[in-house]
Image: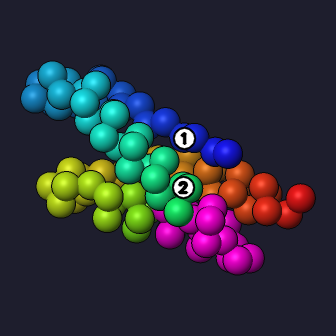
């Protein structure tokens, strides 16, 4: 089972986001983990890139629209989660 975590770089956050960093990380992590489990369950041979796109869409769907609009995950890390899903199903 894959359980990714989202961490925010406090250096790149504004003052308001810094005050809300922990709750934001928890909300983003929860949405990404739910998306990961959903994509894992419905995986049927898609490419890593397709899985990464599904993860992004489903993660954003699990967030408040304002949070989703500002959420831009690191593409490499999202691809790493997608790769783990694809590789897990190759076994």
* Image spot of residue 71 (x, y percent): 30, 51
CA gap, disc 1 and disc 2? 8 Å
- Element type where label 2 sits in the image: helix
- The front one of 66 and 88 is 88
Q: Is residue 21 magenta?
A: no
Residue placed at 33% from the left, 33% from the top?
A: 25
Tally the marks.
Answer: 2
Q: Is residue 35 above or below residue 21?
A: below
List the residue tagged with mark 1: 4
Residue bounds of the magenta highlight: 39-55
Looking at the image, is mark 1 or mark 2 earlier in the sequence?
Answer: 1
Residue placed at 57% from the left, 65% from the top?
A: 39
Label ID, residue 36:
2
* Image spot of residue 46 (x, y percent): 68, 76
* Image spot of residue 88 (x, y percent): 78, 55
User: Residue 10: which quarter of the image?
Assistant: top left
Label ID, residue 74:
none
Q: Is residue 65 above or below residue 43?
A: above
Is residue 76 among what the camera can see?
A: no
Residue placed at 40% from the left, 67% from the top?
A: 57
């Amino acid at each position: 089972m894959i359980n990714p975590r989202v961490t925010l770089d406090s250096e790149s956050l504004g003052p308001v986001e810094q005050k809300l960093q922990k709750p934001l990380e928890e909300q983003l992590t929860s949405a990404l983990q739910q998306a990961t489990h959903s994509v894992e369950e419905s995986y049927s041979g898609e490419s890593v890139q397709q899985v990464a796109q599904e993860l992004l869409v489903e993660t954003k769907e699990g967030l408040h629209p304002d949070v989703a609009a500002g959420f831009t995950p690191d593409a490499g890390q999202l691809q790493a989660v997608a790769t783990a899903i694809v590789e897990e199903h190759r076994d």
